[in-house]
Image (cartoon, helix red, strand yellow):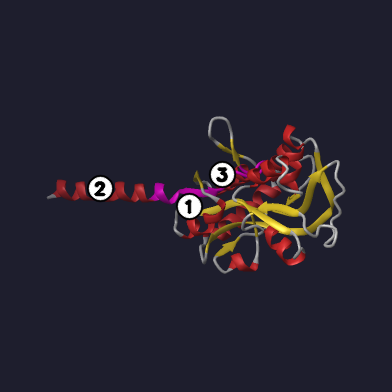
Amino acid sequence: MQTYKKLILAVAASLAMSANVMADTLKMGIEAAYPPFNSKDASGNVVGFDADIGKALCAKMKVECEVVTSDWDGIIPALNARKFDFLVSSMSITDERKQAVDFTDPYYTNKLQFIAAKNVDFKVDKDALNGKIIGTQRSTLSGTWLEDNMPDVTVKLYDTQENAYLDLTSGRLDGILADKYANYEWLKSPAGKDYEFKGDPVEQSDKIGIAVRKGDALREKLNAALKEIKADGTYKKINDKYFPFSIE
């Protein structure tokens, strides 16, 4: 009987240890199609500003992290379906999204700005852009801004930002409205050498947050970790790896 009790206790301890291991492992959701914030390298690994921030937060929380990729259109439903625990993929904090998820404090501030070919006259004006075809990624703040402010512009929506760039270089678009820092990265590439920013940013206070399921206590742990990486210089080191200026 004594041996049997010891066996039961050993099994219980083993199960408890397994539960703790599971509790110390988090899955973070990333689109992996939005450089320099998130993309895949030649080996298929997810890299970028978002991925580095997520890993730094996990290190501060002393948890293991596993990256789970998801298409942008279904990324919030995937979070709520528990395919991952938090979403760090350059997502704008909006009132509409707050109905479906909770957000941490912002981890950077985005701007929206047009790009178009260098050799074209492209004025950021409702009348001047009347009839133009402007590309943007589906389900983004850029798309919403175009619908609200440029009613006579033909808006073409794309599943990824990369596909919008492909259509711009193929002559199917007159311009693109997207996050300034994603455009900044693309303009440095060989494909973007004949294009440039047009006008000033049309939106300068787009706050980007990390999403968790409604009511999840993980939000506060992420906020505490975010404060830590900003205070100890980790955030600045990640920022400087991708940009020669602060995006905070």
Amino acid type for the residue under numbered disc 3:
Ala
Nearer to the camera, 207 or 223: 207
* Element under disc 2: helix
Classify 10 Å Cα crowding around label 1: few (below 14), some (14-19), many (20 and above).
many
Rendering coords of residue 235 (x, y %): 69, 45
Classify 10 Å Cα crowding around label 3: few (below 14), some (14-19), many (20 and above).
some
Please report whichever mark, 2 or 3, sits nearer to the chain's N-terminal start. 2
Is 54 placed above or below 77 here? Answer: above
Is 175 placed above or below 106 here? Answer: above
Q: Name which residue lies at 49% across and 54% down.
A: 85
Q: Is residue 124 visible?
A: yes
Q: In the rendered image, which residue does mark 1 sit on?
A: 84
Give the number of the mark in front: 2 or 3: 3
Please report whichever mark, 1 or 2, sits nearer to the chain's N-terminal start. 2
Dot 3 and dot 1 residues touching (CB under 8 Å):
no
Q: Name which residue lies at 53% across and 54% down.
A: 86
Rendering coords of residue 73 (x, y %): 55, 55
Q: Name which residue lies at 77% across and 65% down.
A: 149
Q: In the rendered image, which residue does mark 3 sit on?
A: 59
Q: Is residue 21 magenta?
A: yes
Classify 10 Å Cα crowding around label 2: few (below 14), some (14-19), many (20 and above).
few
Magenta span: 20-38
Tell me the CA gap for discs 3 and 1: 17 Å
Q: Is residue 204 left or right of residue 67?
A: right
* Element under disc 3: helix
Amino acid type for the residue under numbered disc 2:
Val
